[in-house]
Amino acid sequence: MAKTAEFRTCPTTGLKVDLTAERLIKANAVVAVVFLAIGGLFGLLVALTRWPAVHFLPADWFYLALTAHGFDVLLVWIIFFEMAVLYFASAVLLGSRLAGPKFAWAGFVLMLVGALITNVAVLRGQSSVMFTSYVPMMAEPSFYLGIILFAVGALIGVFVFFGTLVVAKQEKTYEGSIPLVTFGALTAAIIAVFTIASGAIILIPTLLWSLGFISYIDPLLYKTIWWGMGHSSQQINVAAHVAVWYAIAAMVFGAKPLSEKVSRMAFLMYILFLQLASAHHLLVEPGMSSEWKIFNTSYAMYLAVLGSMVHGMTVPGSIEAAQRARGLTKGMFEWLRKAPWSNPAFAGMFMSLVFFGFIGGISGVVMGTEQINLIMHNTIYVPGHFHGTVVAGTTLAFMSITYLLVPLIFRRELMFKKLAQWQPYVFGIGVAGISMFMMGAGTLGVARRQWDMTFADAQLPFDYPSAAFLMMGLNGMAAVMAAVGGLMFIVVVVGSVFFGRKLGIDEKPSYPEVPPQASESLSHYGSAEKLHIPGTVMLVSIFFIAFVLYYFVNWKYLSEVWPLS
Amino acid sequence: MAITSPSERIWWKQPIARIELIWIIVAFIWGLIMFFMMIYWHGAGEQNLSNEAYKITPVRFAEKAQTMIDEYTVRQENGFPVVRPPPGSDVYLIARLWQWWPILELEKDQSYRLHLSSMDWQHGFSLQPVNINIQVHPGYDMVVTVKPDQAGEYGVVCNEFCGIGHHNMVGKIYVVE
Ligand code: HEM
Ligand SMILES: [Cu+2]
Ligand SMILES: [Cu+2]
């Protein structure tokens, strides 16, 4: 690598930005958004079909669209965007050159080719196996091949990230420890290595099986290892979007973590207590002992959950402290009321935080309880839960930071500001709606991944209660709202990136507003003695009470079903 | 800031604010409570999986089910045998594309050893409206001791995607006084 990297200096932050890293961030983010658009469209079609009064797609198209939706949004959109986050958190935040840009591009191309191959396989119609592709149901070989290529590409990107950290350290581009956001990205990247390894261990034999070289794959073994990938990839998402929360808090408020030690420990918990065997997907499968399930879902004390609960206090707490330091000290919530609610980066980030905790987080822990899983497994409660985590949480957080990346990295002025201002609300509330309505329908027994809840063509009749139909209808309406919100995002971002006014070399973007450099006094408010965050304490208390109540209500529900042993 | 290196170089020696510490302790204790709750329920609760399961071939499972059907069929319904096995006995429910076979008739407040297995792909046993959900695999015979506590007509929906007829896979269980 004889060629030296080229840099520009960011007029807003003063950071040195490697131009290759910048181009990679742009490429990954753009492809991510394109797949969000495609996958989101499939999601809308799925939701319209599950709206009983609309029942939009025929059965075979429904299962095809659902497979495409799961793959395109959960894997392609999220992971492409995470690549952009990794390059941003390493090269840009550390002011370093990117290690091995050629490898990074190769990884990008592999991911793109893989994503396209799998999409083509799905659209051909012989691979409607859902993105989980449980054996012994078989897809076309190219379905698995595409996922494997995609994963290899992502792995290369992860190693470029590690390499960049090493380069930055050696070339002394920063002093002291890496920033917290980079640390969060690092935890995500470490988990990604484990995730992708699990994926390879299970998908390569599955590819060989679909080609006829292997005759049998045990369905339980498949599921156990598959979720080694599927579950830990969700932990990547959490680590990444928490890092994004901290980043937005810093960029919008100049907020400083309350305690570097606590926040970093909380990230570390994600690695240390990653559920290697992803037990909570296997709670009602044959052949797993209760000891194994209890230990693995909780590692005896739910320490990964503890990590998230800590971030749930430290992120809003750091914002509150920053706002109070600016003089917004009246009452409990002046800091929050006078927050920049019309700045989509903040509005989206804060909703992401709240919805992830209250909707996705609580339901996830409850559903992952060994016995309670019996009354939820594979009902539409499950998609309800993870639209709370991965859509209201991760996707909304990624959308929010995009509003900052457009001016800072793409160097374009944001277009359609009014649209941008409303977008997080429309999308966020729509998604909160689909999450909660699907959870409601699941509580009433409605199955997930199911085309016809009236069972019109079944040999034996069965009727769900009418409340279940109501829930699925409301879900359809909320889905339309979410889809409109998604479309608003695409319009704003694609419009700005391709047609927005180019910013001059030294021009600071005027929107969204980014605060002036934190003053000296601000950078010291975090000291332990005078930390005063009553609003956050209140929010966290409400969260905790909701959590405890909901947890025990579900034990109550469980106690009312047939005795089983 | 979180996007810059920590301003205190020795950040790990900084004290932790009391409120953070309290929250960590509360969350930790809550984690312990949730952990012990699962164990407690194994002793005090009535809804637990036995985790009794055996490897079995689909052919062997179908034979066992057929023996039960031959012995205890009481009537036919829509082409399905309705089987009324004696309380306490081993009861077999076959999951296959796209049926739950046969229809079972159980007595209220009696225990049965319900065996679940698939002949082909994975299926999801979803008993409605009770809302008990159990995964059914091919090659595994999962045994659950059930004790229906209310008489009535129950649906068995499939809630694991099992191909194009998935939404037509409905079975039935009667519980009689
Ligand atoms: C406009 C936005 C969206 C709408 C309306 C929507 C709606 C839905 C609906 C109705 C289902 C089907 C539930 C079922 O029948 O089992 C579903 C499944 C799913 N969605 Fe979304 N969704 C949206 C966005 C997203 C995003 C952004 C992600 C990921 C980041 C996501 C991830 C998933 C996954 C993983 C599944 C499960 C697929 C499967 O069961 O195989 N969705 N979605
Ligand atoms: Cu089935
Ligand atoms: Cu099915």
Image (cartoon, coloured by chain):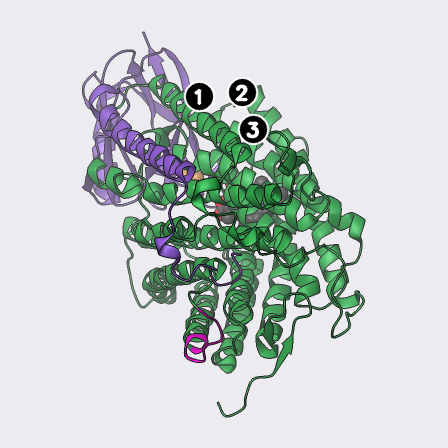
Q: Residue at x 70, y 42 (%)?
A: A341
Residue A36's x, y, as percent?
62, 56
Q: State whether residue A38 appears in this view.
A: no
Q: Is mark 2 within 8 Å of ligand 1?
A: no
**Along the viewing direction, whichever of A507 and B36 lies nearer the viewer:** A507
* Left or right of A314 in this view: A556: left
Cα separation, mark 3 vs mark 2, equals 10 Å
Subunit ID for the residue under disc 1: B
Residue B169's x, y, as percent?
45, 34
Quadrant of the rendered image holding ligand 2: top left
Disc 1: which residue: B129
**Amino acid at the residue labelled 1:** Pro
Which image quadrant for residue B97?
A: top left
Looking at the image, do the residues carrying marks 2 and 1 touch, with CB atoms under 8 Å apart?
Answer: yes
**Residues in magenta?**
A167-175
User: Which chain is depicted purple?
Assistant: B
Which image quadrant for residue A499?
A: bottom right
